[in-house]
């Protein structure tokens, strides 16, 4: 009997392992058959969820890893916070290595008949296993390596935020052009409704910010942030309808205004609860949980939009000829003709120019991984607890600088054609 059980045990284990591998393979191929971009987005989403969980609950596991524990005593923050940060860094570093490796491997791919095209669209089981290895391996690395990654992640996150701003500006302009070019008047009324809604919502939130973040008269910094937001948005909105401005419109200005006001609110809500001008600090725990959810959703949406749209736009790092490209809104989010893996196992030849820049696609995910790590760890300053997300003066100034960059870039897109009439800006 014992001999029989000793034979059955390994057999059952082998069967379970085989079934698990088959399940992973079917899942990976199933997602990939819908879209390669959706598959990569799913990996990124899983890594975000894993980082979120480990940040708050990884301490018991991390305390059993000796090369990590040896450095814990040298940090002047709570051990559970430090262990959570280390877990986030390690998952983010593994995700970064995975996407950056693909980014570097796919530089210069211009035609779907190239062998490297299969690296992007095929071998999903191997890539899924490689992704798991990349996530696990950083837990065996010494702490200085991860601290170095956290240092460079600050700069990578800033670059990701700039890309977000550029894509937002293009999105607003493309949205306005798409609806304004429709023959039916209902689209013009829709544009008017969006414009009024954005401006009304923005002004309402501005009023609330004055009430929430100015509990007494001596809050000059908060007043400056809010007032600068109001005046900056008012200024570029007026400029956008000036007769000398080519291609100006109130609708894009309304969308950019809403985004700038949101950034101002997000920056003020990141102020420490101990700051006297944080008038809603009593509800801080509630707000930070909401900010966590909103931050994750916003980040994921930004990455998905960047990945699915940026490569299809003529002005965003494309590698195909201009005449073969569509506009930002006209290109489908998931193009089955591009993302098929040969689609059927019988295959058929794949040829023709790629529809988006594979290397830039993976670069966006690598940078977004850095941004997610900073979002979850308070920009690596060690000042956040488990109930907090993106809180601290570093977060405040990152968002304010992002807002100023948005205002500056949008204002430049409005006045540049008038200042340099000899250059072609596509209007």
Image (cartoon, rainbow, N blue to C red):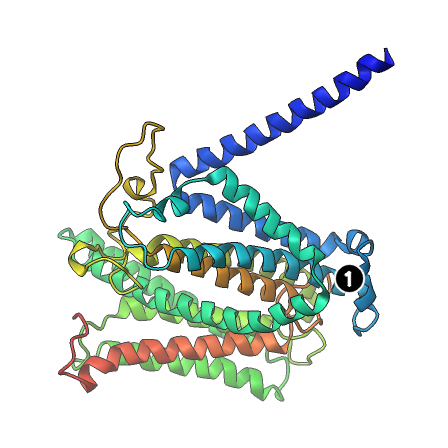
Nearer-the-camera pick, 65 or 373: 65
Identified at 80% across, 12% down, the residue is 4
> What is the quadrant of residue 310 in the picture?
bottom left
Q: Is residue 295 left or right of residue 78?
A: left
Label 1: which residue? Answer: 68
Residue 208 seen: no
Q: Is residue 178 left or right of residue 167?
A: left
Nearer-the-camera pick, 185 or 258: 258
Q: Is residue 307 depicted above or below 417 in this figure? A: above
Q: In this view, does 165 lie to the left or right of 347?
A: right
Pointer 1 local density, CA inside 10 Å: few below 14, some 14–19, many at least 20:
some
Q: In which quarter of the image is the C terminus?
A: bottom left
On the image, the x and y values in percent for residue 268 come to 57, 74
Give the secondary structure at mark 1.
helix
Identified at 54% across, 65% down, the residue is 371
Q: How many marks?
A: 1
Q: Is residue 141 depicted above or below 416 in this figure? A: above
- In this view, the residue farthest toward the top is 1
> What is the quadrant of residue 388 in the picture?
bottom right
Q: Quadrant of the N terminus?
A: top right
Identified at 36% across, 54% down, the residue is 358
On the image, the x and y values in percent for residue 348 come to 27, 32
> What is the quadrant of residue 283 in the picture?
bottom right
Identified at 33% across, 38% down, the residue is 340
Nearer-the-camera pick, 217 or 128: 128
- In this view, the residue farthest toward the right is 2
On the image, the x and y values in percent for residue 354 come to 28, 50
On the image, the x and y values in percent for residue 135 come to 62, 51
């Amino acid at each position: 009997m014992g001999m029989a059980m000793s034979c059955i045990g390994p057999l059952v284990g082998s069967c379970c392992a085989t079934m698990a591998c088959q399940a992973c393979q079917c899942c990976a191929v199933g997602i990939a058959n819908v879209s390669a971009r959706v598959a990569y987005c799913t990996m990124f989403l899983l890594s975000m969820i894993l980082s979120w969980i480990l940040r708050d609950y990884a301490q018991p596991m991390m305390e059993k890893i000796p090369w990590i524990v040896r450095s814990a005593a040298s940090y002047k923050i709570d051990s559970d916070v430090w262990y959570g940060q280390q877990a986030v860094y390690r998952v983010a570093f593994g995700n970064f290595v995975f996407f950056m490796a693909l980014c570097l491997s796919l530089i210069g791919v211009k035609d779907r008949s190239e062998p490297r095209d299969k690296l992007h669209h095929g071998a999903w089981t191997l890539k899924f296993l490689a992704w798991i290895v990349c996530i696990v391996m950083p837990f065996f690395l010494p702490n200085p390596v991860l601290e170095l990654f956290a240092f460079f992640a600050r700069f990578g996150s800033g670059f990701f935020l700039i890309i977000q701003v550029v894509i937002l500006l293009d999105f607003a302009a493309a949205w306005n052009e798409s609806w304004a070019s429709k023959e039916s008047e209902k689209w013009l009324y829709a544009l008017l409704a969006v414009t009024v809604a954005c401006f009304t919502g923005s002004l309402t939130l501005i009023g609330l910010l004055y009430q929430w973040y100015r509990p007494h008269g001596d809050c000059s910094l908060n007043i400056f942030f809010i007032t600068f937001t109001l005046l900056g948005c008012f200024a570029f909105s007026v400029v956008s309808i000036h007769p000398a401005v080519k291609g100006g419109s109130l609708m894009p200005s309304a969308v950019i205004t809403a985004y700038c006001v949101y950034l101002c609110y997000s920056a003020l809500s990141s102020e420490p609860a101990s700051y006297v001008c944080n008038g809603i600090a009593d509800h801080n725990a509630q707000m930070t949980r909401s900010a966590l959810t909103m931050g994750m959703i916003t980040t994921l949406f930004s990455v998905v939009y960047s990945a699915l749209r940026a490569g299809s736009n003529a002005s965003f790092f494309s590698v195909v000829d201009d005449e073969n490209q569509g506009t930002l809104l006209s290109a489908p989010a998931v193009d089955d003709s591009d993302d098929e893996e040969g689609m059927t196992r019988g295959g058929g030849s794949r040829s023709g120019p790629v529809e988006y820049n594979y290397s830039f696609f993976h670069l966006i995910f690598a940078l977004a991984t850095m941004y997610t790590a900073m979002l979850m760890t308070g920009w690596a300053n060690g000042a956040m607890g488990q109930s907090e997300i993106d809180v601290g003066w570093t977060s405040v100034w990152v968002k304010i600088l992002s807002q100023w960059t948005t205002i500056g870039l949008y204002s430049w897109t409005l006045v540049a054609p008038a200042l340099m009439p000899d250059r072609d800006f596509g209007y």
